[in-house]
Image (cartoon, rainbow, N blue to C red):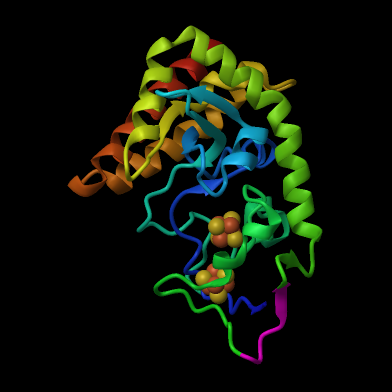
Amino acid sequence: MERRFSCTACGKCCHGLLPLTIDDALAHADKFPLVVMWTPVRQGGRSFRVTADLGITIQLKKRKLAAVRIAPTAYIPRTFPCPELTEEGLCAIHAVKPQRCRTMPFSAYRDEKDQDDLMIPRSGWVCDTSDEAPVVYRDTSIIDREDFEVERERLVRDAAILKPYAEWLLDSVPSLRMELQKIALKPGGGWVLVAFSTLIPRLPKVDIYTFAEKQVPVMKAFAQRTADNPGLAEFHQRYVDGAAEWETLARTQS
Ligand code: SF4
Ligand code: SF4
């Protein structure tokens, strides 16, 4: 089985949530409104094994487990373009864009043998999957593996920080475990959002005040852009709360 795929740079996939490596989140803290997204995957789910390896597992009822992906994430509504997407549909930070964007259409959050459906363009995407496009995936193997491997390597490195962080937060905030268990059992799934500030103290050599100063204008800008849209009330509230939290922190220093 072969899959053909070529990016026509239509920019359509540059919308909505963007999972980031820790380094990418730190490098782009002045651009993206950051959260830590915790996403449970039930045992038997297709990405359970990778998610458990890179994240943590929690106990559900009847001796079942859920794996939880813990991902620094640019928290952007599905209908919003990435703030770095230009009007021409190009990436304004192409040379330094996040590894997640480089690995597209593949994802190191999944097993290599489980990438097949990622090359099927979603509604509105203008990816070229015609016979003219190059073969990029054959018999459950990625042909050009470089970016996939880089992303996996970085996720494994991040896991060394994110796993102990997650265990610590679960112990400190018991309601978080209950919330994750509830979401893991919901038919449609979902996620829990945690403030990025909880992760900063676990990151070596990150000055929280400088980081706060970068996040304040980003959170404020997104709060403003979502203010009059009742359908984005949850996003809006997260930006308002984020701006207030980072502003308080930034003020502490001055
Ligand atoms: S950083 Fe660039 S490639 Fe990545 S989502 Fe934004 S515009 Fe697209
Ligand atoms: S939707 Fe497809 S063609 Fe458009 S930018 Fe994304 S990968 Fe490229």
Nearest the camera: 96 or 249?
Answer: 96
Nearest the camera: 142 or 18?
Answer: 142
Q: Residue at x 70, y 32 (%)?
A: 158
- The quadrant of the picture occupied by the N terminus is bottom right
Picture coordinates of residue 96 (x, y %)?
71, 54
Picture coordinates of residue 189 (x, y %)?
37, 41
Picture coordinates of residue 182 (x, y %)?
34, 27
Q: Residue at x 52, y 40 (%)?
A: 73
Task: Residue at the far front: name it.
Answer: 62
Q: Residue at x 40, y 75 (%)?
A: 124
Residue 200 in sight from this viewpoint: yes
Which quadrant of the structure image shows residue 210?
top right
* The quarter of the picture showing ligand 1: bottom right
Left or right: residue 23 compared with residue 9: right
Count of numbered circles on the image: 0
Nearest the camera: 216 or 21?
Answer: 21
Nearest the camera: 25 or 149?
Answer: 149
Residue 92 in sight from this viewpoint: no
Q: Is residue 68 magenta?
A: no
Left or right: residue 157 compared with residue 111: right
- The quadrant of the picture occupied by the C terminus is top right
Left or right: residue 37 compared with residue 146: left
Left or right: residue 244 compared with residue 12: left
Rendered view: 124 above or below 39: below
Q: Which residues are magenta?
A: 131-137
Q: Residue at x 50, y 73 (%)?
A: 121
Picture coordinates of residue 104 (x, y %)?
63, 62
Task: Residue at the far top: name it.
Answer: 172
